[in-house]
Image (cartoon, rainbow, N blue to C red):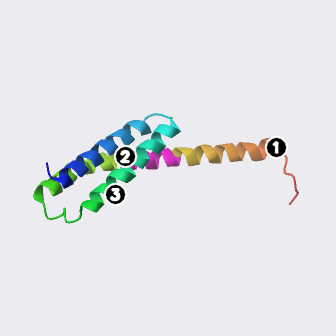
Amino acid sequence: MPLGLAALDDLFTAFDGLRDALTGSDVTAIEQASDRVSRAAAAVRAVGAWRSDPAVVERISAMLPLIESARVRVNLLADHASQRLSILASHGARAAPLTYGR
C-alpha cells in the first residue's frame, strides 16, 4: 500500500475514533481523539503530491461523509454548550444580587 493510502487510512480511523468520542461525554477521550486527528492530518499533508493519485482522491472522497459527520457533531455540541452557559448565566443573574449597582 502506498504511503499516501496508509496515511489516509490512519486519518479515516482517527476520524472514526473522534466520532465515537463525540457521542460520549468524556472530555479526555474527545481531546485525545482530536489530537489523533490532528497528527493523522499532518501526516497526510506531509506525504506531498498525493492529489495526482486517483486512488488517493477516491479514498478522500469516500472519507468526506465521515469528516462532515464529525464537523456537524462538533458544531452541535458547541451550540449545546453555549446554550447551557447562557441558561446558567441568566439564572445566576436572577439568583444572586449584583455586587455593584448600575
Amino acid tagged 3: Ala
Specify start and end residues of the magenta stretch as a single range: 70-79
Which of label 1 and label 2 is nearer to you? 2
Q: Which of marks 2 and 3 is nearer the N terminus?
A: 3
The Cα atoms of the two marked residues, 3 and 1, are separated by 48 Å
- Counting from the top left corner in percent of width and height, residue 55 is at 12, 54
What mark, if any, has residue 70 been given in the picture? 2
User: How far apart in space, not on screen, are marks 2 and 3 (Cα)?
Assistant: 18 Å
Q: SS class of the residue under badge 2?
A: helix
* Depth check, front residue: 23 or 90: 23
Magenta highlight on residue 73: yes
**69 lies left or right of 99:** left
The reply to whether callout 3 and callout 1 are in contact (CB within 8 Å) is no
**Sequence order check, earlier mark of 3 and 1:** 3
Label 3: state its secondary structure: helix
Residue position for label 3: 42
* Residue type highlighted by circle 2: Ala
